[in-house]
Image (cartoon, rainbow, N blue to C red):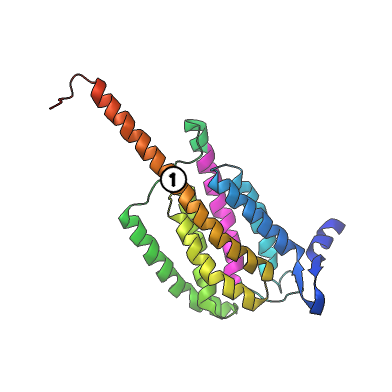
């Protein structure tokens, strides 16, 4: 119990009265480790992420958990709950795929219809949640909090499905998240969002490369099979 109390109270102090909550720093470190695992398509990325989400949930409900920074970001807090629920789904899905195929997930492109649906859900969900978060008293600009919530939901679901595009959704989340978190005084999270912006672009190109290599290998196998099959007509 003393350790838990220490974790809730611990902070990194700077000159001028500025400080960072240790929970915020640790939560983002676990989030970074989870992203690293995601790039490498490791199943352990999901449980590691859940730990970070649980820590950040207590941070963004500042008044509920008696935080030294009494600012509530309900979108940020709500997305931690969403992350945990979606992470359980992704954890199960990737474990099943690994047990069946030896690989936790095979990156693939979403269809054009799916891409269009993702954009519609992102914009429509942001518009629908903004008034709700405003009623709850979320930090302004409330639409940014709603955008981050919806983008995080779609990106996490896309990761579980193995869509290469999920990395680009994270970039869209980071672009809005950095100024919002800076204005709210969550400097550690803002810095991590800035770092994630570059990191998620790297993840996108890595998964893109994996997808291209897979496509080239499939094309090579198809050509070799056609060459060896005597029933295939060659002009």
Q: Quarter of the image for the C terminus: give it.
A: top left
Q: Does residue 19 lie above or below 101 as drawn?
A: below
Secondary structure of the residue carrying numbered label 1: helix
Query: Does residue 40 appear in this view?
Result: yes
Look at the image and give the residue range highlighted in magenta: 74-95
Name the side, left or right, on which 110 lies relative to 84.
left
Q: Residue furthest left?
A: 235
- Residue 110 placement (x, y as % from top left): 37, 51
Q: Is residue 19 left or right of residue 132?
A: right
Q: Nearer the viewer, residue 187 or 105?
A: 187
Please name whichever residue, 64 or 26, is drawn nearer the observer in this view of the structure: 26
**In the displayed image of the protein, which residue is found farthest to the front?**
235
Q: Choose between 228 and 98: the one closer to the eye.
A: 228
> x and y percent of residue 157 in the render?
48, 54
Question: On the rendered image, what quadrant is the N terminus found in?
Answer: bottom right
Residue drawn at point x = 44 percent, y = 45 percent? 209
Of 4 and 223, which appears nearest the observer? 223
Look at 50% across and 42% down and name the residue there: 93
Q: Is residue 198 magenta?
A: no
Residue drawn at point x = 57 percent, y = 42 percent? 42
Question: Which residue, given by chain and number where applicable, does mark 1 sit on?
Answer: 209
Identify the image quadrant of residue 55. Answer: bottom right
- Most common SS among magenta residues: helix
Of all residues, the one furthest to the right in this rendering is: 2
Question: Crowding at label 1, few (<14), some or many (≥20) Cα neighbours within 10 Å?
Answer: some
Farthest residue, direction top = 230
């Amino acid at each position: 119990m003393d350790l838990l109390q220490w974790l809730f109270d611990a902070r990194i102090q700077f000159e001028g009265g500025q400080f960072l909550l240790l929970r915020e720093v640790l939560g983002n470190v676990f989030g970074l480790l989870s992203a690293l695992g995601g790039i490498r398509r490791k199943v352990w990325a999901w449980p590691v992420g859940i730990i970070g989400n649980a820590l950040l949930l207590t941070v963004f409900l500042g008044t509920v958990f008696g935080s030294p920074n009494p600012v509530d970001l309900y979108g940020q807090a709500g997305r931690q709950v969403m992350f945990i629920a979606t992470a359980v789904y992704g954890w199960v899905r990737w474990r099943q795929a690994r047990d069946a195929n030896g690989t936790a997930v095979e990156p693939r492109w979403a269809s054009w219809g799916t891409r269009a649906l993702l954009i519609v859900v992102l914009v429509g969900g942001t518009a629908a949640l903004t008034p709700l978060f405003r009623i709850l008293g979320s930090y302004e600009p409330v639409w940014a909090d709603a955008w981050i919530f919806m983008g995080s939901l779609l990106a996490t679901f896309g990761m579980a499905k193995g869509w290469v595009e999920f990395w680009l959704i994270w970039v869209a989340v980071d672009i809005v998240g950095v100024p919002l978190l800076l204005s709210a005084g969550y400097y550690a999270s803002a810095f991590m969002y800035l770092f994630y912006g570059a990191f998620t672009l790297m993840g996108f190109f890595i998964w893109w490369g994996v997808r291209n290599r897979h496509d080239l290998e499939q094309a090579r196998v198809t050509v070799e099979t056609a060459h060896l099959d005597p029933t295939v007509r060659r002009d």
